[in-house]
Amino acid sequence: MYKPRTVDQPAELLPFLFAAWPLAKKKQVRTWLKHQAVMVNGRICSQFNQPLKPGDVVAIRSDRYAPPETVLASGIKVYFEDSALIVIDKPANLLSIASEAEQEKTAYFLLTDYMRQGNPNAKERVWIVHRLDRETSGLMVFAKTAAAKETLQTGWETAEKRYLAVAEGNLPASEGVFESYLDETSPFKVFSVPRTDTTRHAVTHYKVLKQEFLVLVN
């Protein structure tokens, strides 16, 4: 996507990057350095003031992956990335995908921008595998290829998902099972309803890890 550039006069790396790729946002250029996407003469370089000399070749890696627990420029933390998938820690109050009211402040939009390195005309993208509610934080998996999406979604029903929650009130027992049927016909909401031909059976095994009691004093 970004053709290598040959240095023609002495310079420092960051100013050279700004000049060599003027269409890239400065914030994105700094992200390249932070995520080890810049190579000088075939070696990764993240030092912004690295001296360059005529004849040096500077390239932007297209196969770079964020190291574990990297925080992207958007603020999203990446826990794992390879050629097929990317796993992030979605913060609370961030939509997984766009809604009628919000198109851009979503995990999908921010990761697509990351994949395209700030170039809106690039073709790189991510695929949705599953969703987390806006209020729910936690690990979320996105596919980087259509084949990976199909493979992950094919076995998604058998994957074990674990959640840690704070609940108000008393549960019927210290551990047990909740069962319900989910109606997912609405584009942006899921409802628990009586069983029909279109609902999906949902089973949640729960266990109380800790209890605390609040004492009110007048």
Image (cartoon, rainbow, N blue to C red):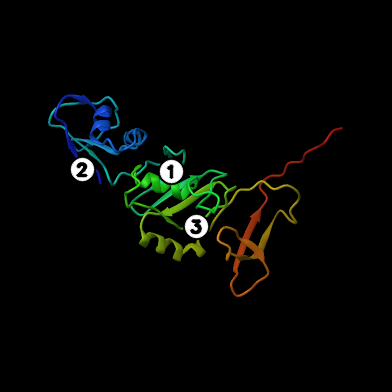
Q: Is residue 163 left or right of residue 60?
A: right
Q: Residues within 10 Å of mark 2 (few under 14, many from 20)?
A: few
Residue under label 1, please give it. Answer: 78
Instruction: Determine the image quadrant of residue 38.
Output: top left
> What distance separates the C-alpha of mark 1 from that of mark 3?
16 Å
- 109 lies left or right of 100: left
- CA–CA distance in space, label 1 to label 2: 27 Å
Residue beneath the point at 27% across and 35% down: 22
Name the residue carrying label 3: 130
C-alpha span from label 3 to label 2: 35 Å
Residue contact between numbered discs 3 and 2, judged by CB atoms under 8 Å = no
Q: Earlier in the sequence, mark 1 or mark 3?
A: 1
In screen coordinates, is 8 left or right of 34?
Answer: left
Q: Between 148 and 24, which is closer to the camera in this rendering? A: 24
* Residue nearest the observer in this picture, 19 or 174: 19
**Disc 1 or disc 2, which is closer to the eye?**
2
Element carrying mark 3? loop
Residue shown at 67% from the left, 61% from the top: 178
